[in-house]
Amino acid sequence: MLTSCAHLSRIVMGFILIKIIAYYLGAEGMGALGHFMSVSTMVYMIAGGGVINAVIKYAAEYARQPRQLLRFISVSATYSAIFCFVVMCFGVVFSKEIASLVFKDSGMYWVIVILAAAQVLFAFVNLVVGVSNGLMQTNVYSKIQIFGSLCALPIIWGLISQYGSVGATLSIIVMYAITFIPALYYFWKSNFRTKVSLVKLKKIEFIRLSSYTLMLMTSAVTFPVVEIIIRQMLIDSAGYSAAGIWQGAVKLSSAYLGFFSIFLAYYFMPMVSRIEIKRDIGFLTLKFVMLMMVVFCIGAGTLYVWRAFFIPLILSPSFSSLDDVIIYQLVGDLFKVLSYVIGFVAVAKAATKVYIAAELIQNALFLLLSVLMLKIYPDTKGVMIGYAISYVAYFFVVIVVFAIYLRFTSLGGRSDAVHC
């Protein structure tokens, strides 16, 4: 029950942030903030090297081996600290250049500096949450998320209502960073507080974690960059209002897709990590594909049928034109969620090359098809049709590759994790 409330609070917070921005800034304001939203998502995902999936996987595997578990957590903390330092230095040194690209105003460099500093907090939260979920202590994640959501709400509202677009940029950072407070509390209460320390990394440990960094950076960097490219094309062809309509759909999508991503990362991936027989992996994956399909279709069907009510409620009346094109976003999201399930098998089995190739393919498809569709429909509709077609095509590619993987490895009966 508590875990469900945590997932719900995260989704609700995503919706509330969208609603407040849409209410105070409108579609054009949402469009102007789009690039910073993409950059913030990117930084949040790669904070500390983006090793949260590795932490969940190996914490689950070492749950009954305290010495190995402690070593792994210390190694992860050291790796994350190094990565955070590098990212912070890069963000501070190139803050003006980044601000010029993101805001078209180098004077906003101080926001980039704050984001670069805040990613240290993001990384800490990811480590605490990763360990607790790997050890199946999901109540810790739940309490962190619920407390963070409750604390963030009044701060976000105050920032946006009082300071407009500048407050909105800060509120995006606050939404990610606020969970540091409860995460620090639970870390302080745990046995790990006096046992985890910075250590000298062995080559094999660095390579193991860096493979997860490569996997997550591929998705964390490529998709936001593709978003920025497409958004700029949309701004050039139809203006900030059209870009804002699309951004509203993207953020609406991200809010509920986050539920599926969290559910698969914290429940499905630890289960797959413990299974060695590929036939069992196939059955479990099929079970979760069907489950995700049913749950998504119920939610998406409700949203689509009552879209004239939900879109003004969640966003604002200025986003009413989204009614005509949201079906394309929902179709794309359905196949994206189904692809998530198979993608997490690659993460659980550390199939680095497979995961990276998959991320590059889906983002290349999205970019290519969006460019083509924008030539036919030079507005929001073109981007959304491109999105839907790209993820339908990508899902069927993933299914074929996964079927080949299961058939090939099943010839040997049992197999260890994929080595790349």
Image (tube, rainbow, N blue to C red):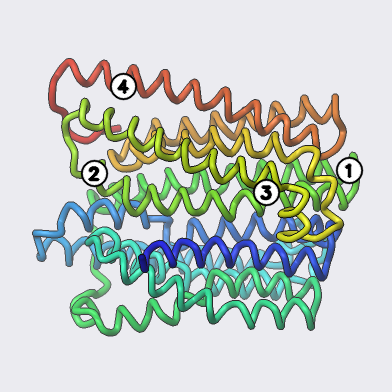
In the figure, 221 relative to 29: above or below? above
CA separation in Å, label 1 and label 3: 19 Å
Task: Please give the name of the residue rendered at 77% of the width and 45% of the height, measured from the top-left corner.
Answer: 231
Foreground pick, 378 / 58: 378
In the figure, 361 relative to 62: above or below? above
CA separation in Å, label 4 and label 1: 43 Å
For label 1, the residue is 236
Tell me the element at label 2. Answer: helix
Q: Residues within 10 Å of mark 4 (few under 14, many from 20)?
A: few
For label 2, the residue is 273
For label 3, the residue is 250
CA separation in Å, label 4 and label 3: 32 Å
**Sequence order check, earlier mark of 1 and 3:** 1
Comparing labels 4 and 3, the label whose residue is closer to the camera: 3
**Sequence order check, earlier mark of 2 and 4:** 2
The image position of residue 7, as x and y in percent, is: 45, 61
Task: Please give the name of the residue rendered at 68% of the width and 44% of the height, measured from the top-left corner.
Answer: 227
